[in-house]
Amino acid sequence: DKSRRQITFSKRKAGLMKKAYELTTLTGTQALLLVASETGHVYTFATPKLQPFVTLPEGKNLIQSCLNATEGGEGEQEMHGMPEGSHLGYESEMAPKQEQSFQSNNSYDSQ
């Protein structure tokens, strides 16, 4: 059932984000986590040094091209039925202390 699947996705995504935060906090490492949903949204977690990958146009374009790449390099470029060049929505999640310094809009709606 579609509703149950969405609930499972949301819970699992939240768990991954929490684990990424814990890993970076406990070990002092840098991390970038991207989770792409079936609906075309990309959810991210990034530590400060890696934040430009999800906030700057160059980083967003890199992510978009990776998601549009086909497995094996053959056939039409798509991901879960999304045509090449379609715009994904981005939602960024950061550690609480990092959220305060993040000035730009962290959610980009699909167009």
Image (tube, helix red, strand yellow):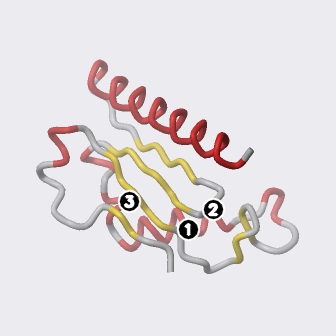
Mark 3 or mark 2: which comes first in sequence?
3
Q: Nearer the viewer, residue 34 or 89?
A: 89
Measured as percent of width and height from the top left, residue 56 is found at 33, 68
- Could you say which quadrant of the image residue 105 lies in? bottom left
Q: Residue at horizontal 53%, vertical 61%?
A: 41
Q: Residue at horizontal 45%, vertical 36%?
A: 14
Measured as percent of width and height from the top left, residue 102 is found at 18, 56
Q: Decide: few, some or many residues near mark 1? Use Cα within 10 Å; few <14, some 14-19, many ≥20.
A: some
Amino acid type, mark 1: Gln
Q: Decide: few, some or many residues near mark 2? Use Cα within 10 Å; few <14, some 14-19, many ≥20.
A: many
Residue matched to label 2? 67
Could you tell me how far apart the alpha carbons at marks 3 and 1 are, in whole angstroms? 11 Å
Amino acid type, mark 2: Leu
- The image quadrant where one finds the N terminus is top right
Q: How many marks?
A: 3
Dot 3 falls on a residue whose secondary structure is helix
- Could you say which quadrant of the image residue 39 lies in? bottom right
In this rendering, position of residue 57 left or right of residue 82:
left
Measured as percent of width and height from the top left, residue 81 is found at 76, 68
Identify the mark at residue 64; answer none if there is no mark.
1
Dot 1 falls on a residue whose secondary structure is helix
Amino acid type, mark 3: Val
Residue matched to label 3? 54
On screen, residue 31 above or below 38: above
Q: Nearer the viewer, residue 12 or 34?
A: 12
Is the Cβ of the residue at disc 2 closer than 8 Å to that at disc 1? Answer: yes
Mark 3 or mark 1: which comes first in sequence?
3
